[in-house]
Image (cartoon, grey):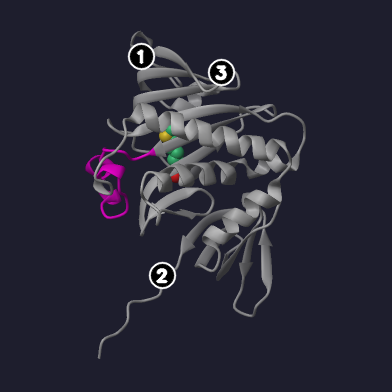
Amino acid sequence: MSPASAKTQDSDIRAVDGWMIHEFAEVTSTNSLAAHLPPWTAVRALVQTAGRGRTGRRWVSDENGLWLSAVLPTPGTSATWSLLPLAAGWAALNVVRDLGLPDARLRWPNDILVGRRKLAGILVDRFSAEAAVVGFGLNVANHPEITDRALAGAVTCLADLLPEVPPISELVVRLLSALTREHQRLESGDASGLCSELNGAWRHRQVQVTLAGDHGAIEGRLDGVDPAGALLVRDAVGDVRVLPAPNVELLREIFPSPDVIL
Ligand code: BTN
């Protein structure tokens, strides 16, 4: 298929909670397809043949996962829209926790992990100044590690964590509703409310941040984010480094080494 194409014979449209949801059997990438759609439209596919992850990586999108993109309006020049990737992560985390996974957690900027395994990822594309496409990839009952052996041990899915998993169509509605709430919060300019909730959730982890453009790496304790969405990392001498999101190429969590039993 060409970029952003879909097998339209399998498409269906339904209206839920202010959203028009287009459902396809197979697309290249729901984010790419959503680029041409108006705000409050969402695209869901059973399978993506060219799913995209952050930093140009591919995203394995096999059957029985949730692959969803939502187009949100981002009117005006408010700086709070730069927090949308974080807000989307917070929305998705709350949906996952409410399913019965209170220990699910965020890894900056918006990966959702259980323990050290990735359950969901989010890709936010800004194809224009007026709108953003928020793409959710949530492993539900799929096994991406079968397609890509390198993912073995690094991913998980809801079906492996919960006794019962709601239908994907219900998860889609829960995600879109949570996203609408976070969008309203940003629209009202309440960046600090979002940041304080986020910071309560992920601060104090030890991290290594690789800076974009060959600027090396910083190791330290994650102090959270500031209201502009910049990462705050306290380095070894106690100085807080303020790292705007575009300057960060990669954040790795550092786990304490296992206790040595003598
Ligand atoms: C990441 O963690 O790297 C982000 C993964 C985002 C994947 C989703 S699946 C739906 C949407 N369409 C895409 O091509 N990517 C996002």
Report x, y in % for residue 18.
Answer: 56, 21
Residue drawn at point x = 45 percent, y = 36 percent? 136
SS category of the residue bearing label 3: loop
Picture coordinates of residue 114, whole percent (x, y): 36, 55
The amino acid pointed to by label 3 is: Leu
Query: Picture quarter containing residue 220?
Result: bottom right
Mark 1 is on which residue type? Lys
Q: Which mark is residue 7?
A: 1
Residue occupying image coordinates x 68% and y 31%:
74
Q: Are marks 3 and 2 in contact (CB under 8 Å)?
A: no
* Residue range corresponding to the magenta coloring: 138-159
Name the kind of residue labelled 2 in the image. Phe
Residue 48 placement (x, y as % from top left):
36, 28
The quadrant the N terminus occupies is: top left
Left or right placement of residue 214 versus residue 165 in this view: right
Quadrant housing residue 224: bottom right
Provide the residue designation for mark 3: 37
How far apart, in angstroms, are the residues tagged by discs 3 and 2? 42 Å
Give the Cα separation between the discs numbered 2 and 1. Answer: 44 Å
Q: Which quarter of the figure has residue 196?
A: bottom right
| Quadrant of ligand 1 in image | top left
Reading the image, the residue beneath label 2 is 255
Which quadrant does the C terminus fall into?
bottom left
- Horizontal relation, residue 119 to residue 53: left or right: left
